[in-house]
Image (cartoon, grey):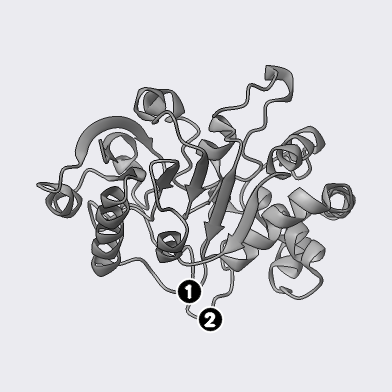
Amino acid sequence: MVIQIPKETCPRPFLKWAGGKGRLIQQYENYFPEGYKTYYEPFLGGGAVFFHLQPSAAVLTDINAELITTYRCVRDSVDDLIALLQEHKKQHNKNYYYDVRSYPEGSDLEKAARFIYLNKTCFNGLYRVNSQGKFNVPLGRYKNPGICNEELLRAASIALSRVEIQQADFTQVLNRATSSDDFVFFDPPYHPISSTSYFTAYSRNSFHEKDQERLRDICIELASRGVKVMVCNSDSELIRKIYTDINFKLYKIKAARTINSNVKNRGMIYELLITSD
């Protein structure tokens, strides 16, 4: 079931996110299943698919604790969060950015405001951490960064009001999704197609080939229960190999590649959209 919301109040992602699906939604439209009751998204990120579908019941999870804290604060305390972001907006400059980046402590609300502030002002809106789990993206070059979009945050808060939000590894979806009433959308860190493309440091632990295979195994198990499954990933040899001959369908989707250490390698590229039926 999908709830229809007036366009002027339609929620959208309030975070920039590498690999976000906002620009691909229209291409995905024909592949979204019908007839489900609960939507699951184990790699939440920017949440573009959730905000687009607006399911009547949803379980949103991610391994990134700061991200989950931020979503919960948007859902539960949006007015207080906006007040903190307005303060960040007033004080924003280069030195302030690095001061905020170096201080990860504080209440959940303060952490959420910090997360959004850094997301809106850092280079390319990247989320990257070092081996100690510390955010290490430099300041971006923006004349007027959108640090506090009140309308966007309030619309997101309403959309999230009926949603369960948890920090969890993607494997935990096996404990929840059990039947054809469930739809699981997986948007994992993409398998790299070259030495300069993509990155997987969304959390302290990177996402490797064995993790891609674990994800594939989970998709097989979910599909065996009748769960509707959709996965997006790079159009790479590994991903094609592990999803071939398991009764899943593979579709090529054209996408813009903007996150690449080599500017010459940015541009259009094909990705895979994989479905269980």
User: Which amino acid type is marked by label 1?
Assistant: Arg
Left or right: residue 20 versus residue 230 is right
Q: Nearer the viewer, residue 184 or 259?
A: 184
Q: Quadrant of the N terminus?
A: top right
Marks 2,1: beta carbons within 8 A: yes
Query: How many other residues sit within 10 Å of disc 2, few (<14), some (14-19) or many (≥20)?
Result: few
The quadrant in which residue 58 appears is top right
Outermost residue, bottom direction?
Answer: 132
Instruction: Check disc 2 and report its element: helix, strand or loop.
Output: loop
Work out whether mark 2 precedes mark 1 in sequence or the reverse, and give the earlier one. Answer: 2
The residue carrying mark 1 is: 204
Q: Is residue 220 above or below residue 250?
A: below
User: Which amino acid type is marked by label 2?
Assistant: Gln
The residue carrying mark 2 is: 132
Q: Nearer the viewer, residue 29 or 130?
A: 29
The residue located at (70%, 73%) in the rendering is: 102
Q: Tell me residue 158's x, y (percent).
A: 75, 38
Q: Is residue 162 above or below residue 117?
A: above
